[in-house]
Image (spheres, rainbow, N blue to C red):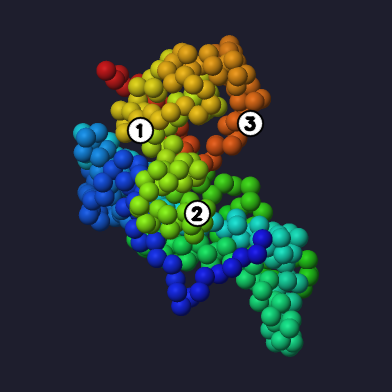
Amino acid sequence: MNIELPDPANPPDYSHFWPSLLRAVGTEPRDLPNLRGASGINHEFAAVGADDAERRLVVVSQEGSAAGAAMAQADLQAAMQDVKVIVARPVVIDLAAVGKSIAEQSGRPAFTSSDLMRIQQVEEAGSEELQATLNDQLTQMFGPLILQIVTARAVGSINLLQGLAQFMDQMSKMNWQLPSDDPDAVVADFSKLLTTPTLQSDSELGVCGIPLYEFDPDELEAIHSGTDRNQIEGILRRHDILQYFYPAPDQTVLGLVDRGQGSLGTMEEVARVAPEIGHPYGSSEIVSAEQLPALIDELRQRKLLVEGELGYELTESGKQQRAIVRFKPREGIISKVVNRISVKINLKSIIKIG
C-alpha cells in the first residue's frame, strides 16, 4: 500500500466532526467543556451532546485511557442519576498499523540492530538515490502514524496529553531492547500489538472507542460537512459505532451468549436494561425478528445458536459471526450491560439489595 501524506501547507480541517457525530446519534451539541462528577472531580470533554426527550447525555471524553473514560462515566452517572450518561472516547493512535507497514517493507514487524545501522550508514555516506529510497521506505513505515496525528489535529478538541497517553500505552505493549552487536537482535518488536485489538480495553469497559485512524479523508469530510444525516449514519454504521448507541437486538443476543450469559432470564433483563441506560434498540441485522423469544428461534433456525445444558450456546457459525464484531466499537454496549448485571449479582452476594 502506497501512503501519501497531506500537504503540510494545506492541512485538512474536520473541526465540525464531533457536532455532526453527536447529531447522528440522536443528540444536540452543547457547550459544556467540563462537568463535575459525584466525586468532585471535573471531567473535561472534547464534545457533549444532549437528548432532552430521552434524558440522554453523550460525552466525548478527553481521558487518555479507556479506564479513565469508564471511571468518568460512573462518576458522572452517580452525580446525575436521572440522566443516562454515555461515554465515547476518541482513539487517535494505532501503532499496530505502523507494525504492519514495517512488515510490508522489511518482511517482519520489527526493527533490528542491522536496520538501525543501515539507516545510519545511508544518512552519513549514502548517495542521494539511496537516501531518497530510504526516506521513501521510512515514509511508508511511519506514514500511518503521521496520518493519525494529522487526523487528530484536523478533528480538533483532542488535547496533547490524551494523544501522548495513548501513544505511551501502546508503546508499553511492545518489546524493546537496546541495540547490540548482533545484527539480528530485535530493537523494537510490534508483534504483540498486531495480536491485541486497539479498542480491546474500551470494549471490555463499556466505552465507545471512536477509532479516528480508521476513517478515510472522504468519510471525515462527509461527517465534518454535516449536510447528509443519512450518509453520516451510514459511515458510523460501517465503522460499527452507531450500533453502540442503537444496538441490534440479534447481535446483542449473540454477544450475550458469547459472554456466557445465555440464559433466557439474562437476555430478558438485558432487553429491559439497555434502553434504561440510554441505548434504545435499533433494527436486527441478521434476522427479521426483534423481540424475544422469536428472535432466538430465528437465530436457532439459522444455526447460529443451539440450546445447551445451562442456556443457549454459539454454534461454529455463531462464533464466526461474533468474531467479525467482537472488538469493534459496538461491543462496548455488550460489556456495559453485562458489567451492570454482574455488579448487581456480586453485590447481592455481599449485602441484601431490594
Q: Amino acid at mark 3?
A: Gln
Amino acid of disc 1: His
Q: Secondary structure at mark 3?
A: helix
Q: Residue at x 68, y 71 (%)?
A: 137
Sequence-first disc among 2 and 1:
2
**Residue labelled with disc 1:** 279
Instruction: Write down the residue under mark 2.
Output: 215
- Tag nearer the camera, 2 or 1: 2
- Report the front residue among 354 and 47: 47
Q: Position of residue 178 (x, y in %)?
A: 66, 69
Compute the Cα span from label 1 to label 3. 25 Å
Left or right relative to 313: residue 123:
right
Q: Position of residue 197 (x, y in %)?
A: 57, 46
Q: Which mark is residue 320?
A: 3
* Placement of the C terminus among the 4 image quadrants: top left
Does residue 248 show up? yes
Quick check: 155 left or right of 1? Answer: left
Q: Nearer the viewer, residue 75 or 195?
A: 195
- Circle nearer the N terminus (2, 3): 2
The answer to whether residue 146 is left or right of residue 160 is right
Label 2 to label 3: alpha-carbon separation: 25 Å
